[in-house]
């Protein structure tokens, strides 16, 4: 496949616009091949019409057909071979091994949703059979299941060119749910998105999916918002900045017909290090923390940007060990000059407001798009007095909030905003206050860790990658794992329907062999 | 129990305000006993603090304790005896048999949620066990389940003084989910709400529930919105007008921390009568339709306000039969003078814009709060040309849209707004276009009926009482049936937690004996 710079209106490549842009290599600053043409209003209208018509047809495909489609996308992505990895490396500055792993995660997600569809029970089929002679009124036959919302707009994310972009978790879960996808390409990796988009379209054609099941647009912010507010679009998936996420959210809730927005926006992912844990293993925790905060140049939404600990001799030992670990971490290329500049500015702000605790011995090269790790400390009362200290700085930086005791830790945690994750390190000696700490963590975050660090998001049934606002705009959801499919569906009940007009999932004989709730009992059986 | 007119800050009665109001009897216009004192800002603050503290404590109660609490509420409501029914009758104008049935539905809902809690599997427990030696990275132990959002604000509804008010579906499902409730009393039935509220508080005290698990306020619109925007409130349940619902929705999404709003606002519940069905049973369908449109003086959110049918000799027969049925329906007391005036104005508008097809032989008594049924017809093209014809007129009125053919029916249905229900009447002869009709119905509504009429909402697992905007502000939910509990929860994942700190639902030995998903398999077994 080649990079053409053209939008895709379903299967049709289109570049009617006059404005173009190029991607650049953050490591070298050089422009990369490919002129990407911004989508025009006429093209957007065509995309919408195609998505609407695809939605009608896609609903008539079976779970097995959708599963084969998803698996074929995975195959087509792998068929892009090294060319895809190389382009992604050039556009993102991320190393090839990381990108190889991320590609595996991406194809793995597609395959996992295929399995979910084949198993089929996720539709939450519920059947309450009729009782015609019930007094005072007969009970009707009622059957419900989850059905797709409609076309979903997906925004590619800068920091995961595969796993949260063209064929990432949002796209995979929306397609699995039965929703066509309109991809807004991320401007930092348009070539990567176009290549993966072509893989999706190729898979769609090979598996006879309807034209419009996937479209791809190069769009500026205004056009992106115009798509968010199009009546055809029924939900939005986004991973990125709080500013970007809130612009989408505000547009979506102020539409004539408001729609759900699943925007993952910002988190500092507090790590609570209780005194007993630090006393027992200061060096080990420091080593793990240094690795987590600097992983991928800190460019993860689950990066641990905040530490709460009690200031004592052990915290001093911890910070000394941290200095040892951090000083040898070399600077590395960040995703873009803009992200790097924001990171540098954020670190400069912290230098004025907090105490430097640890940094790399190797400074970032002047003029290069590089980030290196920085760790600061601040007293709890100063932290509480300055809201900006709790804001995310995207990159390998963390602020250690020094507290007088565990009660101060709980206080500061209680005032924290919603988070994707919250982590506690605790030893036996920490038991007295631990339950209270975990209770507050549960109110604040979508994923709680006991030990370890929050970077690394396992793709599985039990993963929750989501959390209270502002970590996401909808804390009732996860964007990773099989439950991500639940974001793009709604329940529909069928009352007194003849068998022939019921979806397979609700038919008496249970042709899909799924687990259903029949008259209050969960069973894979038939309606007798 | 007595009507005191006092707010309830948890268990404490409070009436510090100076503004009071009384309820009146819509049948007689007479003021009813009881001076209800509007809540003050200080009292609101106390309510919020109490709800927040109750949330912490309520989380430590077991499912069994919550179930007993809900059942005790049902018992305490019944213990209010005839005094409750009489007060509700005086405040709402609804007849005693209807109120007796609604009370049974209300206590039944409480008992059903108690059963749901005892069974326990609704928490969607998911367990993925660790694989320490997985390459390239170990797999952590991840376990997730649904946890309560936090305090929920519930608005009492005018048309269901029991089933959608103080101890109605919103309150029952929020309490079952683990959320304290702050009730905003409906101004049309404050005495009823206070009596039921006292039953809830009495049950809370008898079952040792925390102070603040339920509060009750008399509030004007501005104060209600102030509560919606309080940081303590984490979700809102509302049934009422589109104007009221949108005011709440807009306030909630523009909070610093946006929260979900489950507002059920308006629906005209289209009934599609296909030609074959009308040809086969015009009189029978007309009779059923007349009964449905006039049931409870048309004051149901599922009232069939719109009919789509093909104009032919059979539709004429249908309308003649409808005239027969409608003319003998006597006028009846509506819920309030305001609702009656809005109904009368709505009917007057229709008289100018549509053709009168059927009405009662007995006019509503001048000066009384009465409504009587009206049926109008309009041509499809005229209907499409005037958006106001598709707006809900709350009361016993319906507009029959006459189409040239089934294709025109599909066109008009496609342009309809989101609905709570959509109904089709079809016979064998209607098969050719039927699948297409059902497809559009599915996009537009939360509950689809094959035959019958939408009034009557069964409380069961498979019920979906919800639908795309503007029938509700969140079409991903139902406000009736056991799935209503899912509105007030979010998922939380626990990573590598020791058994002792896991909730019971996620412990290895499965002490609650619930159905869980363990490594992809649904089982009631233990983690081995």
Image (tube, coloured by chain):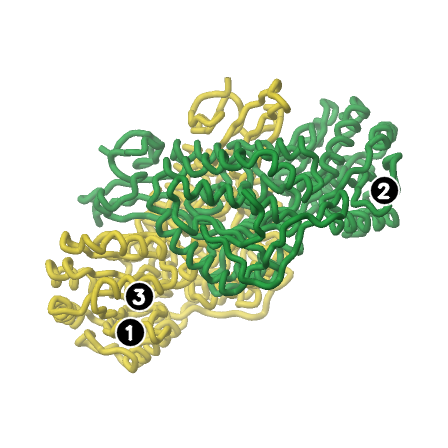
Chain colours: A green, B yellow
Which residue is labeled 2 in the image?
A365
Disc 3 versus disc 2: nearer the observer: 2
Q: Residue at x 29, y 39 (%)?
A: A504
Taking depth in this image into account, of A189 and A293 the one nearest to the observer is: A189
Callout 3 and callout 2 share a chain = no
User: Could you give the CA–CA distance between mark 1 and mark 2, rounded to whole angstroms?
Assistant: 70 Å
Q: CA distance from mark 3 to mark 1?
A: 9 Å
Residue pointed to by mark 1: B381
| Image-based side of B496 in relation to B426, left or right | right
For the N terminus of chain B, the quadrant is: bottom left
Residue at 58%, 22% in the rendered image: B130
Instruction: Name the residue rendered at 22%, 33% in the picture.
Output: A528
* In the foreground, A113 or B175: A113
Labels 1, 2: front one: 2
Res. A83 in view: yes
Q: Tell which subunit mark 3 falls on.
A: B
From this view, report whether residue A513 is shown above or below residue A57: above
Find numbered disc 2 in the image and state the secondary structure of the residue it sits on: loop
Residue B189 sits in which quadrant?
A: bottom left
Q: Which mark is residue A47?
A: none
């Amino acid at each position: 496949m080649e990079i053409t710079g053209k939008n895709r209106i379903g299967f049709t490549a289109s570049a009617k616009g006059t404005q173009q842009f190029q991607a650049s290599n953050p490591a070298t600053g050089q422009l990369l091949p490919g002129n990407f043409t911004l989508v025009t209003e006429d093209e957007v209208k065509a995309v919408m019409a195609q998505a609407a018509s695809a939605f009608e047809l896609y609903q008539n495909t079976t779970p097995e057909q959708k599963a084969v489609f998803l698996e074929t996308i995975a195959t087509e992505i792998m068929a892009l071979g090294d060319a895809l990895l190389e382009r992604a490396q050039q556009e993102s500055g991320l190393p090839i091994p990381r990108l190889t792993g991320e590609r595996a995660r991406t194809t793995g997600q597609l395959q996992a949703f295929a399995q979910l569809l084949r198993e089929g029970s996720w539709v939450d089929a519920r059947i309450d059979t009729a009782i015609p002679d019930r007094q005072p009124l007969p009970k009707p036959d009622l059957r419900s299941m989850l059905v797709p919302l409609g076309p979903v707009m997906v925004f590619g994310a800068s920091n995961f060119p595969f796993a949260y972009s063209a064929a990432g978790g949002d796209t995979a879960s929306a397609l699995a749910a039965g929703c066509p996808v309109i991809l807004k390409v991320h401007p930092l990796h348009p070539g990567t998105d176009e290549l993966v988009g072509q893989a999706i379209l190729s898979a769609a054609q090979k598996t006879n999916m309807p034209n419009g099941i996937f479209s791809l647009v190069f769009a500026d912010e205004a056009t992106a918002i115009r798509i968010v507010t199009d009546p055809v679009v029924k939900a939005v998936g986004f991973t990125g900045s709080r500013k970007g996420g809130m612009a989408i959210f505000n547009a979506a809730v102020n539409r004539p017909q408001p729609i759900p927005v699943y925007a993952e926006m910002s988190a500092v992912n507090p790590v609570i290090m209780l005194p007993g844990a630090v006393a027992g293993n200061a060096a080990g925790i420091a080593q793990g923390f240094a690795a987590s905060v600097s992983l991928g140049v800190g460019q993860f939404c689950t990066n641990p940007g905040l530490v709460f600990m009690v200031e004592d001799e052990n915290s001093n030992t911890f910070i000394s060990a941290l200095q040892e670990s951090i000083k040898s971490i070399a600077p590395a290329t960040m995703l873009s000059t803009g992200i790097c500049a924001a990171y540098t500015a954020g670190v400069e702000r912290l230098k004025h407001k907090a105490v430097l605790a640890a940094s790399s011995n190797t400074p970032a090269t002047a003029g290069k798009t590089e980030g290196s790790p920085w760790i600061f400390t601040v007293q709890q009362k100063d932290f509480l007095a300055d809201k900006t200290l709790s804001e995310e700085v995207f990159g390998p930086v963390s602020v250690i909030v020094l507290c007088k005791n565990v009660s101060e830790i709980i206080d500061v945690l209680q005032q924290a905003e919603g988070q994707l994750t919250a982590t506690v390190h605790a030893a036996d000696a920490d038991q007295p206050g631990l339950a209270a700490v975990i209770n507050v963590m549960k109110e604040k975050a979508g994923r709680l860790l006991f030990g370890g660090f929050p970077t690394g998001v396992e793709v599985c049934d039990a993963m929750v990658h989501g959390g209270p606002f502002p970590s996401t705009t909808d804390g009732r959801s996860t964007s990773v794992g099989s439950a991500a499919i639940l974001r793009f569906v709604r329940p529909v009940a069928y009352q007194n329907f003849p068998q022939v007009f019921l979806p397979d999932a609700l038919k008496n004989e249970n042709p899909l062999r799924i687990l259903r709730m029949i008259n209050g009992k969960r069973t894979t059986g038939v309606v007798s």
